[in-house]
Amino acid sequence: MRFKDKTYIITLVLFLVFLNAGIFSLAFFTNQRNTDAAESLCFSEQAVIADAFEEDITYLGHNGRQLLMNSYGTHYATKGIGLRFEYYGELKYSSLPEGLVAPQAGYSSTQRVDGKRVFLITEVIADGQYYFTYAKDVSYLDEDFKTISVVFILTSFGASALLALILFLVLHKLYSPLSRLKNATEEIANGNFESRADDSGRDEFALLAADFNRMADRISTQMNELELNAETKQSMLDNLAHEMRTPLTSIRGYAEYLLNANIGEAEKIEAIEYIISESERLKQIGEKLLDDAFIRENGINTESVNLGEITAGAAKKTHFNAAAKGIDIKVEASSVVCKCDKLLTEMLITNLIGNAIKACESGGKIYVHCYAEGSFAVISVRDNGVGMTEEQLARITEPFYRIDKSRDRVTGGTGLGLALCERIVKAHNATLEFESALGKGTTVTARFPL
């Protein structure tokens, strides 16, 4: 049974019990008041009759008194009142119905005879000479009680039905936010993570719905992040498998060629150079992945370093590769002290300059700058190489993404360099910006907070 139904039944039963108890208590109270009023009237009538009788017998003899008792009895019988007179213990007159027993002097009683309810009072009058008993049929009190009971029962049924309806509507209104919250939870349980509860209002249900929606938003965000991470990891694994398969296939092919083919010394050297080149590619892939994993798992160790010196040193290390292609590197590095990881920062600059070298043809130029700008230390690498389109710029930091795969095959590119660069700058709370135009070159700017 649902909590709402339990609440409805328990509340309704409690209300009905207390309502009907109150109604029937009122009925009995009303009946008792009517009974008390009737008895009070009987006492008054009995007193009036007794006073009148005492006054009348003062002037009468024995025979006259008997006639007086008969006259009183006949007169009051027409009013539904029975009288009984005893003179010194001897019954002189009685109009009481048979079966009634006169109470003791000074007492009253209610008796039933022939289905009638009779109220009796006995008193001593006329200086102790007479025992006077007054009896009146008060059966109308039973009829009144029946009438009152019927009215109150009908009232109880009507009030109970009205109460049940009002209680149902009130509980339905009160529990409707909870029902909507339940529906929202079912929707989310069924996979609809965009479902939300109605949090309008200021009551506890609205606050609960608002908390539920915040929880659902958090779960939805985390689910999206998990899905994105899963897709990214799967894409990375797919690309990694592809990248490793290609050089391994080349190495195996050239090795079999060396083993089985009858070739000259020059062809052997060419085959060995291909094997060495593809082996180097595999080594680079492994190193880049290990570097990225290290940053992700261990974070960075910062220290105060001179970025100008690091920039000049990184450019100097790439000078040989640039000169081999006929590319000129110009460096302008100011002394800028910044807190960063020295090794990772040097790796960042080396990768950026290495990418610029790959993008340039013979005779190309690369400009490397390091300077302070406001609250940032800026490292800029600009080349006049092949450049990139907007679509290529949007994907440039994706792992294994390469703009010109044919050129990267020759230069040994893995498509992991800029992905690693982005990881490094994020670890430093820095930013990496790209500006490029196809055929005009590319500018990469890293901004480190000072």
Image (cartoon, rainbow, N blue to C red):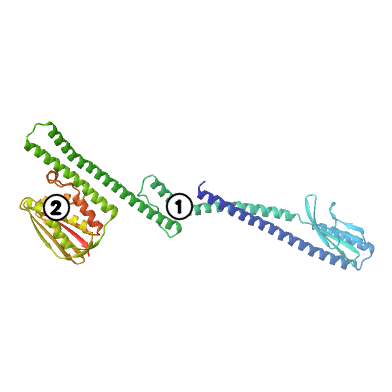
Q: Is 389 placed left or right of 175 in the picture?
A: left
Residue 178: mark? 1
Q: Is 188 placed left or right of 96 in the picture?
A: left
Residue 438 visible somewhere in the drawing? no
User: Residue 223 location, x and y as percent?
Assistant: 33, 49
Residue type pointed to by label 2: Gly
User: Closer to the N terminus: mark 2 or mark 1?
Assistant: 1
User: Residue 153 location, x and y as percent?
Assistant: 64, 52
> Residue visible at 21% across and 49% down?
288
Q: Is residue 257 above or below residue 303?
A: above
Q: Quadrant of residue 51?
A: bottom right
> Residue visible at 24% across and 45% down?
236
Q: CA distance from mark 2 to mark 1?
A: 61 Å
Viewer-nearest of discs 2 and 1: 2
Residue 244: mark? none
Local packing at callout 2 (Cα closer than 10 Å; few below 14, some 14-19, many 20+) is some
Residue type pointed to by label 1: Leu
Element under disc 2: helix
User: Residue 366 location, x and y as percent?
Assistant: 10, 56
Q: Are marks 2 and 1 in contact (CB under 8 Å)?
A: no
> Residue visible at 45% across and 56% down?
205
Residue behind mark 2: 354
Residue 42 visible somewhere in the drawing? yes
Q: Is 188 placed left or right of 66 in the picture?
A: left
Element under disc 1: helix
